[in-house]
Each structure stands twice: as C-alpha cells, then as structure tokens.
Image (cartoon, coloured by chain):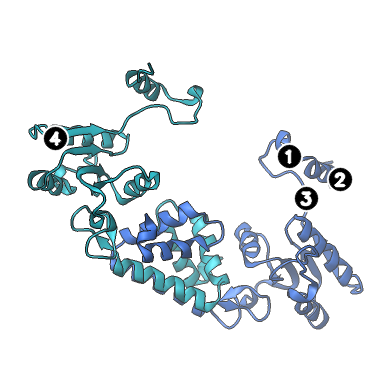
Chain colours: A cyan, B blue
C-alpha cells in the first residue's frame, strides 16, 4: 500500500540505501520518522547534512575529522613513529575503543582486491609509502581485516615495506577470540592459534 | 572515538532514535551517510522532510495519506459497509498486502492499555463509534494484535458495539501459522487452534 504514498515510499528507499538495512527495516524506519514531531524530523535532516558537510578525511591519516587534522594526528602524546594501517575508519574506531594503542593510523580506504579489480593505486597505498619515506617511522602494524582481501593487502604491504630495513612490520595476531569455546572456533583459526602459540614459562 | 567528531555522534544519535535501531547499527548508518556523495545526502534529508510535511492522517479512517482522503476511503469499488479496526497503519499495510480484504479501515492509533494508562479516550475510539452511529455499517472486523493489550481492546470494542443489533462484530481467527510446525506452536496458540477447528466434511 505504501506505493499509494509516494513520499513514504521514497523515504523508505532512502533508508534502504544504508548499509545493512533491508526493505522491511527501511519501511519501519520511515514510519518512525512519521511518528516524530516536525521539529525532531528537521533536527534529523539537519544532523545529516551537517555531518556530511563538516566531516572530511584527515589529510595525514585519512581518519574522519571536523578539524583540519584529526584528533589522533593532533595528539602529541601519541607515538607518531608507529603507524597502524587499517582498511577504513570503522576499523580505526574499533582499535581506538580498546584504549591501548598509542600510535597513529593510516586509513587505506579499501583493500586490494583482484576479484573486484581494486589495485593498489585505488586505495591510499601511495600515501602510506610517502609517509614511510618522508617521516621517521619505526613500525607499521598491518591491521587489515582477516578476510581474503585483507590478507592479500597485508601481504602486498609487507612486501612493499621490506626495503625499509630499519622498519618493523607487524600484523595483528590471529587466534581464538577471548572468552570463546574452542568447540566453536573454525579449523583455520585454531590452526593459526596453534602456530602462534606463546610460551608461558 | 566518535565523541571526537561531534556531528558524527549527533547523526548516530538521530538514527538511534528510530524504532528498533541499536547503538551499533546507528553508528553504521551514520557512516553510510558519510560514504554517500553530497547530492545523495541532500536527497535523503529532503525525502525525510517531504514525507513528514506531505503525509497526514486520513480524516475518515486514520490511514496515512498525501491526499485529502486516503486511497482506501477514496476507492468506490471497496465495500464501505465493512470496517476493519487496526491498531496502527503498519497493521493496515499488512492486511492490504494480502490483497483479499475489500472493505475499509479504522486506525485506532494505539490500544487500550490499563498498565500504561491508555484509556479509550486516548485512542480513536470515539471516532469509530461515530462512524458506526452515522454510517451504514454491516460489519466491524476487529484486527488488533494478539497481544494482551490488543485483546483487551478487542473485548472493549466488542462490548461497546453490542448495542448495535444489526451489526456483525468479528475478530481475526487465531490458529497455527500456515507453513509452521506444530512442534513450534505455543500451547495457547495451539489451544485456540483446536477451539476454532473447522469441519472439513
């Protein structure tokens, strides 16, 4: 019946374009909007336009920021000699949540994906090389996802960084998630956990 | 880290206000917006404001509409003597999807809920009585949800409609969902299905 209400249909379509939102959820969200009072809807629309207008990529690391340079790159207490390379800002946020990492970041804005025709020139790879070449970097931690494309990218980066002899290049550890049952770990993960086992004594 | 990007945080909060959207999904949606190009974001914001501005309740039945009267009430091929009473427009949409019902609707905009202090005067109950009193109605189908409040409302309505002797008052049938296993049906539903069993011969 929503086809009878054009503006409702259009709004649901917009919600449906968001990542991970299905048709039914999109319609439910459109209904939610209709249930808000007018001022709240205006606030929502403004928040959307505002965020899009104000937020841009940090010219150094690619993180989102409203300022000229992002809060990580601005922070002088952080170790600017350690760069953690991530696929996207979402990954960066996940690592920040741990509140343990005190280095800086480099957001690739994607991963190398031969299947999808994404070559290194389509991600922020040259920018990373530029940083390693010109800045005084001690370590690059490769924190791409543990997906096939993430792995390919990690391999590619580690090879590209090999010529820098002073540079330590590391990769996030694989293993069983903390708090999980071995029973539910897949064989590949378990294999990697064995391979990467650490001596306790 | 999003607390460092105020406009992102604000946008995520807005998404989080939508029904059924959790904190993590809200942030994912806010990210999705940032990934759209500017024109698309403007389109989204406009769709939101447009829908809110154009859509209002049908003065007859309470359905959403952009026109003066909703498409159901406008439709002369529908039986205006049968009113299906629903809690909200979502329920109306669900029934419309079946494409079997050819009567009209009455949206209550809520249910009677003693626990939440929602009395009949807080929903569109008087409007329903008004219609039954002044229009030539043959049947009222009570299609409130099968929740405790929906049941209370159905009871209340059926009692209120009892004085209209010519009027048939009915309630949606309870029973096992089509395609489902008896194994998964709860006892109450199964009990109702037995109670409402239909003779096949």
Question: Dot 1: what SS?
Answer: loop
Q: Position of residue A130 (x, y in %)?
A: 10, 47
Asked if labels 2 and 3 touch by Cβ distance under 8 angstroms, the answer is yes
SS assignment at label 2: helix
Which residue corresponds to mark 4?
A167
Task: Give the chain of mark 3.
Answer: B
Which residue bears the numbered disc 2?
A: B195
**Can I make out residue A22 in this image?**
no
Check contact, mark 4 vs mark 1: CB within 8 A: no
- Residue B174 disc label: 3
Q: Position of residue B3 (x, y in %)?
A: 39, 59
Q: Secondary structure at mark 4?
A: loop
Real-space Cα distance between discs 3 and 2?
9 Å
Assess disc 4: are there few (<14), some (14-19) or many (≥20) residues with their C-alpha within 10 Å of its C-alpha: some
Disc 4 is attached to a residue of which chain? A
The picture quadrant where one finds residue B65 is bottom right
Kindly identify which residue carries mark 1.
Answer: B185
| Relative vertical location of residue A116 with respect to residue A201 in this rendering, above or below | below
B23 versus B41 height, above or below: above
Which label lies toward us, 2 or 4?
Answer: 4
Task: State the CA–CA distance, disc 2 to disc 1.
Answer: 15 Å
- Indicate the position of residue A150 as horizontal and vertical percent values: 27, 37
Of badges 3 and 4, nearer the viewer stands 4
Chain to which the residue tagged by mark 2 belongs: B
Q: Which callout, 4 or 1, points to the residue nearer the camera? A: 4
Q: Residue at x 24, y 37 (%)?
A: A142
């Amino acid at each position: 019946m929503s086809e009878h209400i054009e503006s409702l249909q259009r709004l649901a379509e917009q919600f449906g374009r968001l990542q991970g939102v299905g048709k039914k959820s999109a319609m439910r969200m459109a209904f939610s909007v209709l249930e808000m009072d007018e001022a709240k809807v205006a606030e929502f629309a403004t928040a959307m336009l505002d965020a899009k207008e104000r937020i841009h990529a940090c010219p150094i690391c690619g993180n989102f920021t409203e300022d000229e340079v992002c809060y990580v790159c601005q922070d002088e207490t952080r170790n600017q000699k350690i760069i953690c390379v991530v696929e996207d800002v979402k990954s960066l946020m996940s690592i920040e949540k741990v509140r343990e990492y005190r280095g800086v970041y480099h957001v690739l804005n994607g991963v190398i994906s031969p299947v999808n025709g994404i070559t290194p020139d389509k991600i922020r790879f040259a920018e990373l090389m530029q940083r390693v070449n010109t800045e005084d970097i001690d370590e690059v931690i490769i924190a791409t996802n543990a997906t096939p494309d993430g792995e390919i990218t990690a391999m590619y980066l580690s090879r590209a960084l090999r010529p820098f002899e002073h540079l330590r290049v590391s990769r996030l550890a694989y293993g069983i998630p903390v708090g999980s049952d071995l029973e539910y770990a897949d064989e590949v993960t378990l294999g990697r956990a064995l391979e990467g086992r650490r001596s306790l004594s």
